[in-house]
Image: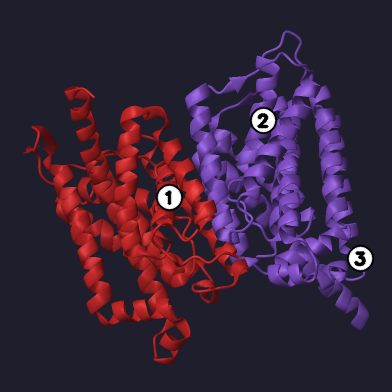
Chain colours: A red, B purple
Amino acid sequence: MSASSLFGLYLSLISGISYGLIISLLAGGLSLIYGVMNNVNTSHGAYYMMGGFLTFFAVSSLHLPIVVSIMFAFAAAFAIGLVFLYVLIPKKMWVSSNPDAQNTVMIFFLALAQVLQQGAFIVYGGGSIAVPAIYFGNIIAPGGVFIADQTVIAIAISLLSYLGLFLFLRDTKIGKAIRAFSQDRELAEAMGVQVSTIALMTFGLGVSLAALSGSLNSSIYSITAATGWDELVIAFVIVTFGGIGSISGSFLGGLVYGIVYAITQYYLPAYSFVIALVLIYIVLVNKPTGILGEIIERA
Amino acid sequence: MKELEPANRTLAFGRVKLKDVNLAILIAALFSSLLVHLTGLPYLQFIMMYFFAYAIYAASWDLLYSYSGQLSLGQALPFGLGAFFTLMCIRQTQLPLIPSAVLGTLAAAAVGGSVGATTIRLKPGYQGIALLLFSQVLYQITLILYGEEGLSIFTATPLSQTTVYASGMVIFAVAMLAIYLIENSTYRLKLLAIKGDNLAANVSGINVPVHKTIVLFLSSLFAGIGGTYYAIFTSHADFTIFAVTNSFLPIGMAIVGGTSFLGGPIIGSAIITLLIRTLPIWYSLAVTLFVYGLTVMAILKIRPTGIVGLLQRRTAKGGLKAAQG
């Protein structure tokens, strides 16, 4: 392999790691919602798109600084998620082990994703939007590679978000209740944990993570109203690889996806997404618990 | 989802048997298509052709979901394959239309069924995701191979609209009648037993994996028929046929009309086809799809049994009042 090939691969890997970490936040939210609520959120990709547009709205219409805009998108997505769950989904389906109820919720969220996507088309049209970087500039990584400051900041925010999520689940009262609920629902209820509070908090948090992921990505790449479907599939890929219901699995799954995607993008750019999908399809049908998780049981 | 129990199915419309209602809806659809043909209005006929394809597509999804409890979030896979294989046969092997359509449909059934068979051990939700992943793979591959233009057929002697319309009516009638016969056969009971409890069905001597696979092949076959007809009357297929929004189409149609009844997908697809083919005359496609999504959400929220469920409730109330009176 020539020096220029190695250099290109090195660049691709850095880009893949940053993309993988950012997109793993989306997967982490999906995994959290499934792990606690037993529902697959098929509208998760739409919240990713919504995060980008909320940040764009805050920057362009409310004239907020970019950091505040990202925080605004995170908080607004949390509130929107709560409203959607509370208003649209029957309460008895929020947390359910009944396959019929789970399928209904999946179909409901699929319809909601369509509404959100088309709503964004109606308001913003089909063009792409991008939000300004938090900080402009480059750093020089080992090997003389230039990396945009924004990429480094996005990686740092992703890592900090994971740390925050970890501390939230470990140290706060509601976090402990969420963990207790996901481990043993009946026992947690007997100890006074409210199902509705847990479901609302979990859903809101999961949606916020998706929005944060979209928000960070819109500052590096760009986002259109059509964004979200591919990212939903990527989130499924990461979650399935890392194990559905496992947050740490999503983190590692995101990194692995980013690296695999970067390598295939470098050697077979046209087929990189296809290769990733085929690999994960093989994992899903042969080891549905994922590489790291043990949550899913076979029917 | 609130569904009628199998035991209620024969009495769901008061004194009228459900299977008769389904047959009546099918006959009414055929009669309406005949009337549309007589009007001689080309655009209305074109909408009706979409209806023929979409109704078969929606019924194929409902057969899989309501009767065997298997969820496909990637039903665009066999539908799109039917369309693409047919056009490929015509363009690349120069086969005549009818053999191409037959080969396209069979290929869709074979690939759709084989891919589906690898997912039968998964829970419905994960089965849905696996099938969605595979349809996304085809979305990407067809985009790479055929670009955004996709595949189109242009012949020196194109079929007349009357011929395409009449063949659509025949395909629609035959496919729906076949689904009707499956849904009213004793085989249905095996599928419902599998849907109810896999383990209990297995203990009762039903070979669950085999029957799940059979219904996947059947569902793919019907979706392939719908896709093949779609390719014939539009003379075109591109990567968007595998898009998630296209996989959502039969789900939404079956939900609006009502799942577990053949009449449901027919009514649902009639309403949604009319909506998505006429609303863009006045509003944008985005507004149309927005309204479509809202309609599905409203039906799921207010009347999960769909329009047929609403009719059933009214008929049952009427029957009760008549009995009391």
The residue drawn where x is 76% and y is 10% is: B157
In the image, residue B309 sits, relative to residue A186, either above or below, namely above
Which residue does the numbered mark 3 point to in the structure image?
A: B16
Badge 1: residue crowd in 10 Å (few <14, some 14–19, many ≥20) = many
Q: Quadrant of residue B237?
A: top right
The residue drawn where x is 79% and y is 25% is: B164
Q: Quadrant of residue A68?
A: bottom left
Which quadrant of the figure contains the N terminus of chain A?
top left
Q: Earlier in the sequence, mark 2 or mark 3?
A: 3
Which residue does the numbered mark 1 point to in the structure image?
A: A237
Which quadrant of the figure contains the C terminus of chain A?
bottom right
The span from disc 2 to disc 1 (Cα, nearest Å) is 27 Å
The span from disc 2 to disc 3 (Cα, nearest Å) is 38 Å
Which residue does the numbered mark 2 point to in the structure image?
A: B83
Instruction: Choose between A39 and A134: the one closer to the eye.
Output: A39
Mark 2 is on which residue type? Ala
Mark 1 is on which residue type? Val
Disc 2 versus disc 1: nearer the observer: 1
**Chain containing the residue with disc 3:** B
**Chain containing the residue with disc 1:** A
**Chain containing the residue with disc 2:** B
The residue drawn where x is 64% and y is 28% is: B84
Badge 3: residue crowd in 10 Å (few <14, some 14–19, many ≥20) = some
